[in-house]
Amino acid sequence: MIKPFEKPIYVTKPYLPPLKEFYQGLEEIWETRWLTNNGPILQRFTQDLSTLLDTDNVCLFNNGTLALQIALQGMGISGEVITTPYTFVATTHSLFWNKIRPIFVDIEPDFYTIDPEKVEAAITPWTTAILAVHVYGHPCQLDALAEIARRHKLRLIYDAAHAFGMKIGNKPIAHFGDLSMFSFHSTKLFHSIEGGMLTFQEAGLKGLFDYLKNFGFKNEVEVVMPGTNAKMNELQALMGIQVLKHLEEIIRKRARITEVYRKRLTEIPGIHLVPALSPDIQYNYAYMPIEVDRKEFGMSRDGLYEKLKEWNIHTRRYFYPLICDYPCYRSISVNGSLAVARRVADRILTLPIYDSLELSDVETICEILQFLHHKTSGKPMVGTEPARL
Ligand SMILES: Cc1ncc(COP(=O)(O)O)c(C=O)c1O
């Protein structure tokens, strides 16, 4: 008999560097007593990221949400911005906090990123920018969006919260669009406990972002603009530096987990996987989304989500509900039917994935899914019969 997991399997678990390495870093902080305000460790972390991403235009923040809010303010974005309802709420909140009107358009059905055709159809004289999301790390349709932005003279901003560590044809994903925001929250494959980063094309924005994240201070006596406090501290930067050293290993392990999931899940009717990404994309394996077809699988997505909890498997319904369905955004403009986004939001489930998840546990999760299909649909077992059934 397959048994529920003894310890809960959560959708994610943060990577932690070896404790000895972290102690060594802490000793430096204890020595200098420099805890925040552009300290030496933050400067080193910024340099490491700059080297990795091959750009000097890097600015770090205490989280991704404030980074995005500051980006929009610093770039002077106003009026209407075309965006996706299929994302984490912070994408839209950053617009709202800047008094910008989000215009939600539909996504495409394969990778769930914003549909460029729908973007173009929603442009009005008030549109100033496109805010697209590399959801799950799936790159948006970069060329199509760049072309629309160029033709209509719009700024192209990427919420790349999920896309750290990715390259397109050997070029870091940070190089696409006018600006990208990356989140270093602990739930992400790469993290600095909490943290955020902006990368951008226009070098002049760096000074502006530095002011905006530090109260607008130019020096001890001059405040040049009404900034906020969005600085990354030394402990966050230390964690970031140390996790960064293990980035390749983290991605490699996640790739292996994804491979096992994909191999096993294709055997289960009613579970739909994202198509293979184009070979020129170096993916980061940030999430493991599946779509559940109620009829084929024998149980609804919500039914499965609840049932899996009984097996001590804690999945997430990322991203459900759609942002435009939250009461605070219900009265905000939606362009078109959002039929794809609605369908996906009703079927999506993200499965556990993190570097320390054992492959044998991934196999067990797949066996449980297969068993639940078999039990609820009444259909015969398909594919490899689990040994323990
Ligand atoms: C798509 C997306 N945008 C923005 C954010 C906000 O980032 P943070 O948590 O670092 O503020 C997150 C996640 O946390 C996210 O998933």
Image: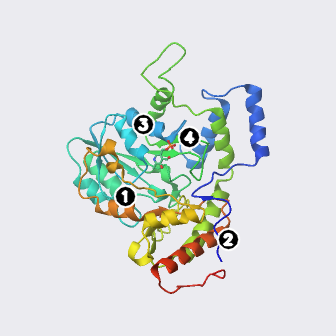
Q: Residue 34 at what x, y percent from top left?
A: 68, 26
Label disc, if present, on residue 143 of the rendered structure:
1
Residue at the spot of label 2 = 360
**Res 339 visible:** yes
Cα distance in 3D space between marks 4 and 2: 32 Å
Image depth: mark 3 or mark 1 in front: 3
Tell which circle, 3 or 2, labels the residue nearer the N-terminal end.
3
Question: Quadrant location of the N terminus?
Answer: bottom right
Q: Residue at x 60, y 72 (%)?
A: 260
Name the amino acid type tagged 3. Answer: Gln
Tell which circle, 3 or 1, labels the residue nearer the N-terminal end.
3
Label disc, if present, on residue 134 of the rendered structure:
none
Q: Residue at x 34, y 60 (%)?
A: 341
Q: Is residue 1 left or right of residue 73?
A: right
Tell which circle, 2 or 1, labels the residue nearer the N-terminal end.
1
Name the amino acid type tagged 4. Answer: Gly
